[in-house]
Image: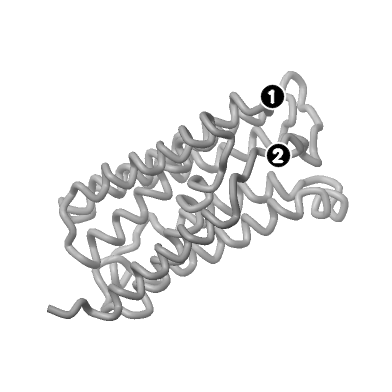
Amino acid sequence: MEIDRRYQGLFGVVLLAMVVAALVGPIPQDPAYHRFADSRACGLIPNCLNVLSNLAFWVVGGMGLQSVSHWPAALRPAWRVFWWGVFLTGFGSAWYHWAPDDVRLVWDRLPMTLAFMGLFSAVLIDQFQLARWVLPSLVLTGLASIGVWLAFDDLRLYGLVQFLPPILILLIFAFFPPGRISRRAIYLGLGFYAAAKGAELLDGEIFALTNWISGHSLKHLLAAVATVWLIRTRSGR
């Protein structure tokens, strides 16, 4: 039986991403990553705004965890993993920014992989009625990306874990009928997350322009707002 060309396209994108990652070669962690534009302290809190801006993840993550019960049973585990990832990112990122280094960065990235994989799993389960094994499989892949980075100083798999799911989600939404998840909410969430990544890249420029908030602190706030749209993502809401 011929495989639907839409599925072929999705598999093709995954394969292409893997080929490109292989051709690019290892991507080591840049030591300069830990040098942020805003290093101001607030009393005993170093790197104050980069630390305190993570409070937004605690608030939104807690709200999201309370919303999980509104979902059908098949989707609750994926959403629960997503919201725990958001909530724990607040702790991990605050811990990292208190004294930025590679060791603390692990605890920043670990919960983020939970959020990435939780959301991707929710979409896959909703759209294709996949078995629940997809969630643990993707979570293990996310955790493996951290392990590969630590063992080989290579961020390629982590990059795929972070950036490939949003691309696949957009393609799924473009070529498959709607499921129970509100696509508008996902679009808004991904849009704010893209803005957050842009702010991260313009860390110093934004700090120089505003002289009170850096691009990285703004990234935390925009990323938290991105998840707000996902609290009630049922179609029609």
The answer to which quarter of the image holds residue 217 is top right
> What type is the residue that disc 2 sits on?
Asp
Q: Is residue 95 above or below residue 55?
A: above
Q: Counting other residues with Cα less than 10 Å from the Cα at mark 1, is it few (<14), some (14-19), or many (20 or more)?
A: some
Q: Is residue 101 above or below residue 205?
A: above
The residue wearing badge 1 is 99
Q: Is residue 200 visible?
A: yes
> What type is the residue that disc 1 sits on?
Ala
Q: Position of residue 204 (x, y in %)?
A: 82, 49
Q: Which mark is residue 30?
A: 2
Asked whether 73 or 44 is in front, the reply is: 73
Q: Is residue 228 left or right of residue 137?
A: right
Per the image, label 1 sits on a secondary structure element best described as loop
Q: Position of residue 130 (x, y in %)?
A: 18, 58
Asked whether 86 or 166 is in front, the reply is: 166
Q: Position of residue 136 (x, y in %)?
A: 26, 42
Q: Is residue 91 above or below residue 56?
A: above
- Can you name the residue that lies furthest to the left here? 1
Q: Residue at x 46, y 32 (%)?
A: 147
How many marks the image carries: the answer is: 2
Per the image, label 2 sits on a secondary structure element best described as loop
Q: Counting other residues with Cα less than 10 Å from the Cα at mark 2, is it few (<14), some (14-19), or many (20 or more)?
A: few
Q: Residue at x 39, y 45 (%)?
A: 63
